[in-house]
Amino acid sequence: MIKKGFAFLVVLATLGAIGWKAYEKAQQKRKGAERKQRQAVTAIEMAPVKKATIRDVATFSGTLSARSQFLVAPKVIGRLEKLMVDIGDKVAKGQLIAVLDSQEYEQQVERARAELDVAKAKVAESFSAMDVAKRELERRRTLREEKVTSEAELDEADARFKVNEARYKVSQAEVAQKEAALRTAQIQLSYTQIGVSWDEGDESRVVGERLVDQGAMLRANEPIVSVLDIRSVKAVIHIIERDYSKVVPGQEAALTTDAFPSTKFTGKVSRVAPILKEASRQARVEIEIPNPERLLKPGMFVRAFIEFDRHENATVVPLAALVRRNGRQGVFLVDTQAAQVRFIPAKIGIMDGDWAEVVEPALSGEVATLGQHLLEDGATVLLPQPPSAAKSPQPGGKSKP
């Protein structure tokens, strides 16, 4: 038994020694492969660190609307007899644009005028009766003083005068009532002449839509046309919570539209909503844009560019140069003499198009812009030939207003 146990231990020790040798060989192969990989030369492209002006510009999309817009509608019912304007026509303040059939309203004016004449005749009649009763009362008073008539006859004359006086006042009130009815009928007749008017400015405006045709029977307050003021327009955009504090009234904005792709329009933020919609977490912002040539039309889609910040003489590198190593963002600075790179952790500021601002540390020289994802700190690199041939666009090269 002792011999068998000793033999088993010898076999176990032999197997352990063989396994250890195999493990050492595998480790040596792995380390050799890693050493070869580190010694491999990576070809790169590079670009110089520059000093330039860099901007923090946000892009928003929105829709244009008119500076002001209102609907023109009749205040009374009637058949549309004439419509003097159409889509795109300019209209002046106070201009007559439509006429309703007025025969019924003219008849109402004539009837009201006739009723007023009758009321005035009643005034004259009641005044004459009151005057007669007044003279009779004065005569009875004189006779009573002379003891010729009785007290009862005097009281009867006084009552008769008061009745006629009351009738006279009622007839006067009826005249006032009929005059008011006549004015009402005349006003309703005037409503058959439909014009446009507004309070702000005397400049002409334009017809946006025609909503009915000539000859239509209209109800009261049924729209006929819409009138727009597009001397300036407003772009309505919506901003998220992150950008809300950066947008303030008076801030300048640049705008473009597909209708005029080569034209840049400028405007200013006119209003910022004091609330954000709970569903979208966005706030409404209005940008007022001068439109003297009437090129911009309500309903157009626009892109608005608002500059939040600008840094002059900033240190900038191509955006492609930024990499992450061990959880830190930075760039590979190229030592062109030694053909090696060094990883520099960097604090990044504004990103503008294809360029990024390096706030810290101070940088100069060349940075790797291609092949950098294969690099480690201290790696040997294959430089482009010649180094001066590596050209790069200027900061701000991305098309922005």
Image (cartoon, rainbow, N blue to C red):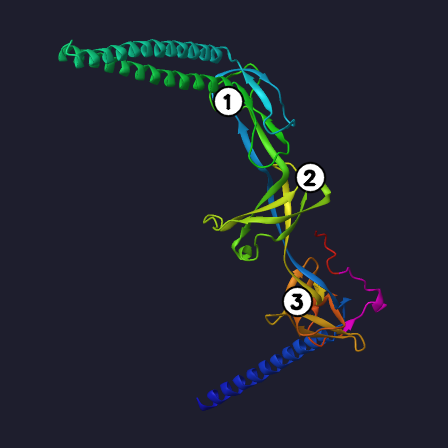
Callout 1 touching callout 3 (CB < 8 Å): no
Vertical arrangement, residue 165 with respect to residue 228, above or below: above
Magenta range is 381-394
Residue most extreme to the front: 146
What is the magenta segment's predominant secondary structure?
loop
Residue pictured at 72% horizontal, 52% vertical: 399
Q: Is residue 383 magenta?
A: yes
Vertical arrangement, residue 197 with respect to residue 175, above or below: below
Residue pictured at 62% horizontal, 81% vertical: 24
Q: Residues within 10 Å of mark 2 (few under 14, many from 20)?
A: few
Badge 3 amino acid:
Val
Cα gap from disc 2 to disc 1, whole angstroms:
31 Å
- In the rendered image, residue 162, in percent from the top left (x then y), is placed at 24, 16
- In the rendered image, residue 236, in percent from the top left (x then y), is placed at 57, 44
Vertical arrangement, residue 326 with respect to residue 123, above or below: below
Badge 2 amino acid:
Pro
Q: Which residue is mark 2?
A: 292
Q: Which of pointers 1 and 3 indicates the residue nearer the eye? A: 1
Q: Which of pointers 2 and 3 indicates the residue nearer the eye? A: 2
Q: Is residue 222 left or right of residue 147?
A: right
Q: Residues within 10 Å of mark 3 (few under 14, many from 20)?
A: many
Query: Of 25 and 239, which appears nearest the observer?
Result: 239
Badge 1 amino acid:
Pro
